[in-house]
Amino acid sequence: MRPFPLMLAPLVLADLHAAPALAQDAPEPKVNALIVYGDLRALTIEQRDRAKRTMERIVAQHLPRTDARITFEDGYPPLSPSAGNRRLLALYDSASRDLGLGPVEEVDPSRAGAADVSFTDGRVEMAIDGIGLRGAGGHTNEETADLNTLRTQAQRAALMLLRLAKTKRAS
């Protein structure tokens, strides 16, 4: 399995009970508890659910005299690729090029983060994300917004929306 479009990234490994045994250089330290926190990402809800079922089957096959559990807390849903989303991106890209601002390309989903628009997946004909201000340090205390990008981003969005409205009226 490739790391993406499905990615499980362990973030924290904790074992408070094993620390004394490890400190005593025991030849075979006993691990009383192992907790792994991770982030499960997928391109579709179906893919995410399939991955969960696979991990649950693996965890259920733990060794004798051991116990294993896995739990999931769903955060943001995935924003599935769709023909509608690609059409909207094409309109945005065309607007950007026509304004002389250069091409806009699809971002590799493995490099994208959670987006509020993901909650519309399957409920709207098309959706787009990442057309706001540019900046750095996203979702941290160090996050900044580059106000110099406000004008160009607004121009792209306005022209795209105008063209989308004209297309809808014509059909």
Image (cartoon, helix red, strand yellow):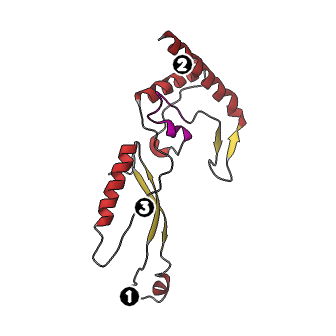
Task: State which region is magenta.
Answer: 116-129
Asked if the residue under mark 3 is in contact with the one under mark 2, i.e. CB atoms within 8 Å, the reply is: no
Quick check: 78 above or below 87?
Answer: below
Badge 3: few (under 14), some or many (20 or more) residues near its Cα, within 10 Å? few
Badge 1: few (under 14), some or many (20 or more) residues near its Cα, within 10 Å? few
Find residue 106 and report its horizontal and vertical position in percent.
Answer: 48, 33
Task: Give the residue pinned by disc 1.
Answer: 27
Identify the residue shown where x is 47% and y is 89%.
24
Whether 123 is among the magenta residues is yes
Find residue 74 and report its horizontal and vertical position in percent.
Answer: 47, 52
- Alpha carbon distance from label 1 to label 2: 68 Å
Q: Give the mark nearer the N terminus: 3 vs 1.
A: 1
**Magenta segment, principal secondary structure?**
loop
Q: Nearer the viewer, mark 1 or mark 2?
A: 2
Task: Give the residue pinned by disc 2.
Answer: 164
Residue 96, quarter of picture? top right
- What amino acid is at disc 1? Pro
Find residue 167 and report its horizontal and vertical position in percent.
Answer: 51, 14
Badge 2: few (under 14), some or many (20 or more) residues near its Cα, within 10 Å? some
Residue 34, quarter of picture? bottom left
Identify the residue shown where x is 67% and y is 48%.
143
Task: Give the residue pinned by disc 3.
Answer: 71
Q: Point out which mark residue 68 bears.
A: none
Going by the picture, which residue comes out furthest to the right?
A: 147
- What amino acid is at disc 2? Leu
